[in-house]
Image (cartoon, rainbow, N blue to C red):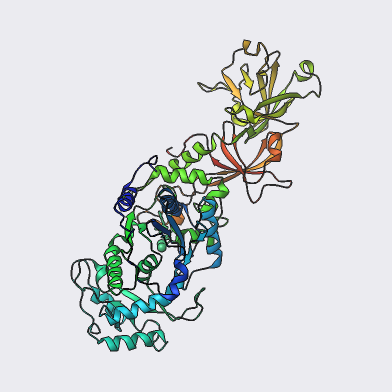
Amino acid sequence: DAAKPSNFLRQIIERDLEQGTYAQRHWAGHPADASDHLKGQADPAKIRTRFPPEPNGYLHVGHAKSICLNFGLARDYNGVCHMRFDDTNPEKEEQEYVDGILDAVKWLGFSWDANGTSHYYHASDYFDFMYRAAEYLIEAGHAYVDEQTPEQMRANRGDFSRPGTDSPYRSRSIEENLSRFREMRDGKLADGAAVLRAKIDMASPNINLRDPALYRIKRAEHHNTGDKWCIYPMYTYAHPIEDALENITHSICTLEFEDQRPFYDWLLDRLAEGGLINQPHPRQYEFARLNLTYVLTSKRKLKQLVDEKHVSGWDDPRMPTIVGLRRRGYTPEALQLFAERIGVSKADSWIDYSVLEQALRDDLDPKAARAMAVLDPVKLVITNWDEIMGAGFLDACSAPVHPHAPERGRREFMCGKELWIERSDYEETPPKGFFRLFPGNKVRLKYGHVIECIGATKDANGNVTEVQAKLVPDTKSGTPGADAVKVKGNISWVGVADGVKAEVRLYDRLFSAAQPGAGDKDFLEEINPDSLKVVTAYVEPSLKSAKGDEKFQFERHGYFVADRKDHGEGKTVFNRVAGMKDSWGK
Ligand code: ATP
Ligand code: MG
Ligand code: MG
């Protein structure tokens, strides 16, 4: 797709397609237990990526970047992206999370069904193959069972300044290793009593190559395989095998895994030598994870916010989870646009939150219907209304649904003697440059008449309880001569007669620190106490028929969405998605 800006991953894929890197695959002969998962993979020339979440929480905006990247590359290069649950860890995984993740990927606009084939996989389906591959490594002299204590193992691993020390178990015979490994599998050893390790190089400058663990003993029930296994593969061992069995070509992950790449290649090279996997094997490429200012992108910390009730749930509109962003009013298109704009790079950086909000505005501006809303209402009384317009008369006004799309028609609302206006639109003593309501000044009621402010009534505390003005005849917007009276200010309003009372939730950033939890700060102490303000507002009558999840631009105020959970049937509830312009830098 030449229209898309290039990046290092696109260049690698284009090179591989041009050189036919994967076009001539050497097939190992599929292991029986994996063959089901390799159906429909007859075309080796296609590139294959995967999105491999662990089902231990809800996805967040960082995952959205990874989803758009992996599914987007497959789409753009006529390839396939696999939806794979990396469920090799028996603990922490739940069906609720599996369902949530699938929903999020679909909502973002992607599908794992390609050409009539479902590319939906579970890593745990490969446990039998992973076990056989481990026995193969033992037989080929590439793995051994280590029975040092975890403390001894840690001490003998060495560190950056000194090489590690070989385990006394490293020189065991193949036969002894094999029988010990089978005893591990058969439950003859206690949890933690032994691990299977790769035999690579205890002096390697890359600590990940100092005989990494491949299997550990863990008596835990697995959601997919039940109690069949009491040994489980380590993530670093399982992941390359998952990729290889699924014929992934480009295995794209975040930079933290860069130091694991030599082991990824070591393992797949050994399995290829043994004829266990297809060749050429997948290659790992790393990109910088998304860091977004004022936002946490760690499932563990987000779970803590939910568990400790700092937010109302995973879908709280302040959460950077995909369900949270969705409820906040973000659209799939805005998140895709955001992912495209931030691009992929090999260097870690922080993206300003305003980039996300701008993507939302750019997506919604041409789409969202306009509406008037008064968020901090005070009553305006037009004292000469009865005299000029007639007692009880309501003056029909209208405005375009969308200013650039006349074909979408007009919204209608009534102007009357009493209106709701923004409290901040009146000042007794106007500051410099204030052109709205103050005694003696004229402003236009948007889509209506010009009025001249008389004054206001206050309560004992000095708070304005009512503003008064006079209507200036023959100035109605859209009628001949309406512009004869010049005004500098234009105010939005909602009729008391036909306005709809609404609960409006004004969300702000959840954290007051740009990098929550950075340094030795506790991220919980950096929660913004004013991240949610609920107000009683009045909105124009066209919003009576708003459906849950429908987005609007409230004139002057920004973008709002009818809350997908709480709006409807006798309750009007809107969430603020974003203001009209960036306020994050301030
Ligand atoms: P977390 O650290 O939030 O728990 P994770 O990496 O453990 O995230 P996984 O479920 O393993 O979560 O992630 C699935 C995929 O999403 C991985 O390929 C991972 O690289 C990618 N991913 C996770 N977080 C980010 C991020 N902040 N930016 C880009 N990609 C991410
Ligand atoms: Mg992970
Ligand atoms: Mg993690």
Determine the image quadrant of residue 545. top right
**Total count of labels:** 0
For residue 204, above or below residue 408: below
The answer to whether 414 appears left or right of 354 in the picture is: right
Q: Residue at x 46, y 49 (%)?
A: 511
Q: Nearer the viewer, residue 205 or 454?
A: 205
Q: Quadrant of ligand 2?
A: bottom left
Residue 505 locus on image (x, y percent): 60, 44
In this rendered view, identify the residue nearer to me: 565 or 376. Answer: 565
The N terminus: image quadrant: top left
Quadrant showing the C terminus: top left
Residue 546 against residue 372 in the figure, above or below: below
Which residue is nearer to you in this view: 158 or 246? 246
Q: Position of residue 76 (x, y in %)?
A: 42, 48
**In the rendered view, does 9 fall on the left or right side of 304?**
left
Where 96 sits versus 129, above or below?
above
Question: What residue appears at the point 55 percent right and 57 percent down from the top-left corner?
Answer: 103
User: Which x, y percent locates residue 515?
Assistant: 39, 50
Relative to 188, is 555 on the left or the right?
right
Above or below, comparing residue 50 to residue 143 in the picture: above
Residue 542 lies, in percent from the top left, at 69, 35
* Residue at x-position 58% and y-position 56%: 312
Q: In the rendered image, is residue 346 in sight?
A: no
Please state if 357 lies on the left or on the right of 425 as rendered. left
**Residue sitting at 23 percent across and 66 percent down?**
206
